[in-house]
Image (cartoon, helix red, strand yellow):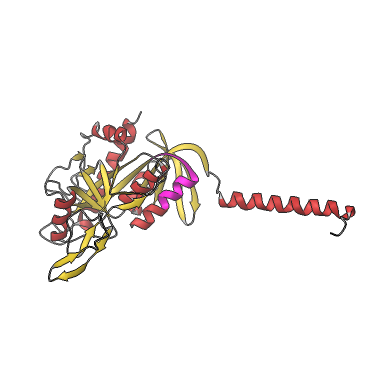
Amino acid sequence: MPPLHLHRLPRLLRAMSLAFCLALVQAAAWAAPWLDETPRIAIISAFPAEMNLLLARVQAPRPHVVNGVTFTTGQLQGKPVVLLHSGISMTNAAMNTQLVLDRFKVTHIVYSGIAGGVNPVLHIGDVTVPQRWGQYLEVLVARETAPGTFTPPVWMDDVKLPRFGANHPRPVEVRSAAQPKEHKKFWFDVDPTLLNLARSIQGTALADCDAARKCLGHKPKVVVGGNGVSGPAFVDNAAFRDYTFKTFEANVLDMETAATAQVAYSNGVPYIAFRSLSDLAGGGPGENELETFFKIAADNSATVLLAFLAAWK
């Protein structure tokens, strides 16, 4: 072994110190710092128009941009909040829900926006607050073993729900901070305390006309409880709407909430969602109603969210 040259020792120590510092910098970059130290309620919407209704009410707004997503911190109804437009789709909802949890001190998650109604007793403009959400388009597409018969593989033991064509709904495999062992789960429950708070504002008055005097033929209401489902599809089909209602006993379907619910579950963060019916998912007599009643539905969802925050003690 060659002898150690003592005159090189300071240089070696400097090099080791530099390497250590670089490693710390890299570790800090990987573990991104909080963008804000205040514990906040995360409020998420899929459409910019939905979010803009709330942003206009935020006091002391401060924007933060991460990966192209704008997070706005401030006060809403006297509560510390961080608002973000997640974008449409399950992937966007999951990705940006996790991003807000990684970069802000989020205590609760609230989703607000529009959705399609599948329960025949509900109407456009109604605001639903389901007690749980599931991913109804997490499916097995089964092979046709006889005309009109679609059979799951014998080893697939989690296919329990009725199918739609070749599509058999399945639970998702999840892990969480509380249950790190992988397990299967279909429904993700809303936080019961938040749900009880929502029940206290069921009498909130909702709009039945927009500024252009487009009006509904009924007075909308707030409905708390029941089920909601989410998946990567815009649904405008009467037969599939009927299947969704009967199979999942769903009030409403959308393209984001269950993804956010799964992220909330994994991180152990309480969540709730307010969804106002903008259309009937193919159940109406004519063209899809979303473009006609989007403004009323978005306004009503925002109205209920604001009432919810005001009642939050």
**Which of 115/33 is in front?**
33
Left or right side of 27 for 81: left
| Image position of 147 (left or right of 190) | left
- Tell me if residue 138 can be seen: yes
Secondary structure mainly formed by the magenta segment? helix
Quadrant (top left, top right, bottom left, bottom right) of the N terminus: bottom right
Q: Residue at x 88, y 55 (%)?
A: 5
Q: Which residues are magenta?
A: 96-108
Task: Please tell me how many numbered marks the rendered image carries.
Answer: 0
Residue 12 spot, x, y in % from top left: 81, 54
Residue drawn where x is 49% and y is 52% of the image: 65
> Residue 217, percent across and down?
11, 48
Q: From the viewer's side, name the closer residue of 294 and 140.
A: 140
Q: Residue furthest bottom?
A: 147
Looking at the rendered image, the quarter that the C terminus falls into is top left
Whole-percent x, y for residue 40 in the image: 44, 38
Residue 144 highlighted magenta (yes or no) = no
| Residue 52 visible, this angle | no
Front position in the image: 107 or 69: 107
